[in-house]
Image (cartoon, rainbow, N blue to C red):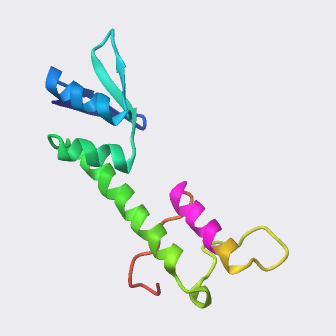
Amino acid sequence: MMMKVDGGYIFVKASREEEAVIKTWKMMSKDKQKGWWYGRISLQLLDKLYHNGGLIPAAKKEMERLAYIQEAVDRERTRPAGELKPMVEYPVKPNLYAHQTRAANMALMVFGMAEPPRQGVGN
């Protein structure tokens, strides 16, 4: 299986048998002119490709980055309310409730606007 990563998408050139499997995922489309399958990079898609033949180094690195962000979001989701701290100074006058701080912190991490805190360093 040939693979390349470009602009937030992953492109795959697959054999007929591999195409049959890719079709069942409903996560990729086929460019019939070029013969490539393409899909928006997500942790779920990269995991399926990993278990169906492996990943190129660029895709593996992106999978590790997305998994790290997901773990940080999960830690934030389960953090006790007393331990929550805003990741940045939010531009609102009233103090945020715990669920609002949690949601804002998770959004910053998911959208790449703040680096997820390292596990075990004050977290």
Q: Is residue 12 magenta?
A: no
Residue 91, image quadrant: bottom right
Indicate whether 79 appears above or below 42.
Answer: below
Report x, y in % for residue 25.
Answer: 33, 36
The residue under the point 52% across, 58% down is 110
Report x, y in % for residue 52.
Answer: 17, 41
Indicate whether 65 appears above or below 19.
Answer: below
Total count of labels: 0
Residue at the far right in the pictured view: 93
Report x, y in % for residue 44.
Answer: 35, 48
Of 33 and 62, which appears nearest the observer? 33
Left or right relative to 26: residue 59: left
Residue 40, image quadrant: top left
Residue 23 visible within the image = yes
Report x, y in % for residue 120.
Answer: 38, 84
Q: Main secondary structure of the magenta part?
A: helix
If the image is split into quadrants, where does the N terminus sit? Answer: top left
The residue under the point 38% across, 33% down is 26
Residue 102, image quadrant: bottom right
Residue at the far top in the pictured view: 33
In this picture, which residue range is highlighted in magenta?
A: 102-112
Residue 15 visible within the image = no
Indicate whether 4 appears above or below 108.
Answer: above
Indicate whether 103 appears above or below 24.
Answer: below
Of 114 and 110, which appears nearest the observer? 110
Left or right relative to 3: residue 78: right
Residue at the far front in the pictured view: 24
The residue under the point 35% across, 57% down is 65
